[in-house]
Image: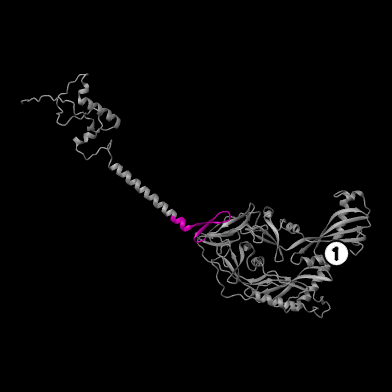
Amino acid sequence: MANSSSSDFQTFVKIFEEQMNIFYADIPGYTGVKVVRLSNGSVIVDHEVLLQLHFSDFNASYDASMKNLTQTLQNNCTSNDKDKLCFTEGASRVTAVPLSPKDLSDECKNASVVAQNLQPYYVARVINNTLHCVSNCSAWNPHPFHCVNGKCHITSEGPKCQETPSTTSKTSISTNLKTTPSTYATSTPSANATTTPSANATTTPSAYTSMKITTTKTSSPSTTTRGHTSTHSQITSSSAPSTTAVPLKCLNGGVLVGGRCHCPSPYTGRRCEEAENEVQVVTVVATINVSVTVKNWKFSPEMAIYNSTAFKRFVKIFVEQMNIFYADIPGYTGVKVIRLSNGSVIVDHEVLLQLHFSDFNASYDESVKDLKQTLEKNYTSNDNDSLWFTGERYVTEVPLSPEDLSTECKNTSVVAKNIQKFYVARNVSGNLQCVSNCSVWHPDPFSCLNGNCYVTPEGPSCYCEQSDSYWFVGRRCEQGISKVGVAVGVALGLAVLLLIILVLVVLLCWRRCCPREKGHRLTHLPPDEERWYENEPEWVARPEGLDPSAPAMESSSAAAGDDPYSSMSSEQDSSTADQGSFQPRLDKVDTSLPRRIARPQLKRP
């Protein structure tokens, strides 16, 4: 019965479902049961109770169904029929299963809500307490496809832009959303969940975009519920010239299927560009150490050598037989042989279990108890290769260690290999989660003061936010740059630069319009006075009153020193050469020297 494909399993499930449909008939929203597994003791039935509830008042409806289900399970038998099932008093367990984003997304995978060829381009969104399936053309989509000049519409190839749409496409879908509760016991559903399509569906932000789902939404107690929808929809579409959208490029190992990226855990997003900071681990691997003695097998020294031919041959038969022997142990997944030793053949091995972390202790204790009861048998099966046991059987419990929990985060089905080193295992409110450096549950969180943290293959990084007044920069977005300060600084800088340019222009214009003479000559003086400021060595100033046309005075070389003009000329030449301009020095004039003036001559005309 533990094998879901066996005839015993199918026979029991058929009877169980028929009885539970009667048993659960009065639960509000009940639609059916789904058996998950059967296990030993007498027969433990893990199953899901499926409900159909309205989405708008889901919480109240779900609580009412949970309460009614718990009361129903207080009965000990399903009915008075000959196939009735009776339960062990107090052994039923009911667990509420809240709706997850995946449950909502499943509603948009229903062909009665969205045509199958368009489903990759629709996602579920709650808008004003109403569940909608919105396409990439909708403003409510997390990654809307924008058309700059035109309108967006959805085709089987993906979102496209059309220039002149002739008609708009509206979709109004009223849906019943199924969810399930899960319980350890039996369950019977018979519920008529009513769905009321709203006559005036609220419109979504853009045409060709969304489908409104007026739903009954459910989840149920310990019988788990998953969403299924029954809807009526009518889609009117129009054809128009279109341009093909650029195909998506999936990142981080994502695979493009039907125009949508399927991302490996923990990546998410339209292109698998972001990694979730917390990944919940539902089940963990636990072990029980067992030692048994097989009496109908002769030990050989080669069997003690790990991976030898004799060792592998015995282990193959042992594993096959023990899979039958341990089949009814709750959570059993296999055995791992550690070593073989003499006496007949002592087999030390590990029994591997897969148990829910949330109720690990109770499940583990139950598996250990069942294992000990199983080992009281003396043989594995009735097959020809059956193994017979003798002597003592030793069972040792192995509690979960921090290393065991960390191993769960090294599983590529939980965390992608390229970012596993940035995740650690943590027990958060009784749930095992793999948390990254960006999570507050991490022992050494990477804090972004003014931004959002995300994990990349290179490590945690910060995406800095912007406010109305500041830009934030830095490795942890710790530095703020004032937008007002930047604007004022730029304005002042430009003003100073403009002022400098104006000053330079004015100076350049003044220099070109009013050039200054060589030697700082004053251009406003009369020509005769201006000659005093010229630096011309051939011109020699004469004493006042001397006629410039008078003949030059004769002098000999011996009397050259007596000629004041020679002396003045020499001084002037040296002064001119040294200073570059003529400067009269009256204190250098020797007034004791005699002056010789030529006799005036009268000339008649």
User: Residue 515's x, y, as percent?
Assistant: 28, 40
> Is residue 271 at least partly visible in the picture?
no
Q: Quadrant of residue 375?
A: bottom right
User: Residue 600's x, y, as percent?
Assistant: 9, 25
Instruction: Please provide the residue range marked out in magenta.
Output: 467-488
**Residue on which the image places disc 1:** 371
| Residue at the image point whose x is 85% and y is 49% from the top | 307
State the residue in front, 78 or 108: 78
Amino acid under disc 1: Leu
> Is residue 505 at least partly visible in the picture?
yes
Q: Quadrant of the C terminus?
A: top left
State the residue in front, 374 or 225: 374
User: Residue 502's x, y, as percent?
Assistant: 35, 48
Residue 209 belongs to magenta span: no
Q: Quadrant of the N terminus?
A: bottom right
State the residue in front, 536 or 477: 536
Count of numbered tags: 1
